[in-house]
Image (spheres, rainbow, N blue to C red):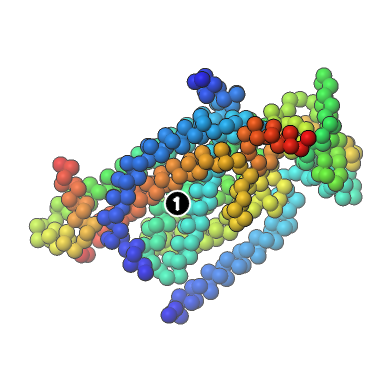
Amino acid sequence: MLTKKVKSRVYLISLILVSISIALFFILRSLNNNILYFKTPSDIKLEKTVNYNKIRIGGMVKKNSLKIDSEEIEFTVTDFKNELIVSYRGTVPNLFSEGKGVVAEGVLSDKNFFIADRILAKHDEEYMPPELKDLLKDNVK
Amino acid sequence: MIQKIMFMNGYGVFVWFSFAITFVSCAIIYIKTLRTLKKYENEYAKELNKLSVSERKIVLKKSKVASQVFASYNKSF
Amino acid sequence: MFDLINPSRVFSWIQKLINFINSIFFVVLMIALTFALIISPPDYLQSDSVRIMYVHVPSAWIALASFTAIAFFSVLSFIFKIKNLNLISKSIAPIGLLFTFLAIITGSLWGQPTWGTWWVWDARITSMVVLSFFYIILIVIHKLIEDEDKAYKAASIVAIIGSINIPIIKYSVDWWNTLHQPQSINLLKGTSSIHSSMLLPLMLMLLVLLLYCALIFLMKYKTEIIRIKKKNIKRL
């Protein structure tokens, strides 16, 4: 049914797609560190030397770790394996709170301590009305 | 009530602006598309009008598209 | 099989469809807007800013779906040389660009009050910007290349290459750390982490925007058919 010409065009397209996909796969893999928008506390722990350049780290704000002074806030970022203490001066987004996601931009002062100069809130993919959230909370209690 | 809907707990500006920009740009594209369509319809109908009577008869008979565009063009005058 | 999409055959249906969509559009729009802006509840975390989702998410879906459709038709037209599919692809491209822009702009308006920033270069957002470049190339090709057959050929190749970007956009939130949240609705598993009282306005707004897309597509497609017929007026 398929003529020779049609077949050759099918091969040509498959060849183009496969070769570009493979090329792109390797490009993306080598760029992986640049594509990651932030590093997790575990990534920081795995690094042999402390990187003092400006980086972004992200994870969950650990429950009951948030301390707010008059000028400074301090909290622990966790990915449930490793932790990192973050200190920050300035205003935080509305959605920033304990138990929620956070991305902080700044520098490491050592392997466990991070000084942020910018805080972004990362929220999850769940959307529900407040009454329902209260109900869920009650059930957990 | 209306104030509450406008204000939206302080997020009103962002929400209303998102909806406004969506519908305004959709409306602009709609008007542009409609104008282009009308322009092409009119030009096509005018060219059909320019043909000699016998030629036009053949074209209108052979092409459904031509006969429909021609009919709706003449109706609007 | 391809006779079904023969322009002369579908032409009489196009205007009927346009009239039908026009007649129901405003009713559906008003219902959707009422649900999206008034009836639906605010989010437990994001409060009322979650309403931006009702324009942002359908726009992004349409932007991705349009390119998928263009890529699919381009593969078919490249292999089987069906000219009509090129007209369809050409008619879809501007719609895709419009909704890519809308997804990016409404996303920015959503990011400021929730994340705390208008813009970040994370994998999801960057790949959406790349998508808009592909749409722009597709549209510009038809303006720059005079020879129509060459333009269609170039456009199909660009669309086929660009199709690789689609899975990257879709899975960027799973493959890399991004500020953008992961997808809420999983079509394969049929699960959704959006509560039904928010899913309804989302689907209604999707319906409204899909009707709008159909309207623009039909008008553009009709324009293309007339343009071809006009060019070949003497050849009959």
Residue A9 image position (x, y, % from top left)? 49, 73
Question: Is A140 above or below relative to A44?
Answer: above
Residue B69 lies left or right of residue C206; in this view the side is left
What is the quadrant of the C terminus of chain A in the image?
top right
For the residue labelled by badge 1, is the local secondary structure a helix, a strand or a loop?
Answer: helix
Q: Name the image quarter holding residue C211.
A: top left
Which residue is tagged 1? C93
Q: Is residue A66 visible?
A: yes
Residue in view at x 65 percent, y 35 percent: A132
Residue C115 image position (x, y, % from top left)? 67, 34
The chain letter under disc 1 is: C
Question: Is C115 above or below relative to A25?
Answer: above
Front residue (pair C165, A93): A93
Q: Is residue B17 visible?
A: no
What is the quadrant of the N terminus of chain A in the image?
bottom left
Residue B32 image position (x, y, % from top left)? 36, 41
Residue in view at x 50 percent, y 48 percent: C62
Residue C5 image position (x, y, % from top left)? 35, 62
Front residue (pair C125, A66): A66
Q: In the rendered structure, which amino acid carries the disc numbered 1?
A: Ala
Q: Name the image quarter holding residue C47.
A: top right
Q: Residues within 10 Å of mark 1 (few under 14, many from 20)?
A: many
What is the residue that sits farthest to the left in this orientation? B53
Residue A95 lies left or right of residue A2; in this view the side is right
Front residue (pair A13, A132): A132
Residue in view at x 42 percent, y 57 percent: C89
Residue C114 lies left or right of residue C160; in this view the side is right
Residue in view at x 83 percent, y 48 percent: A43
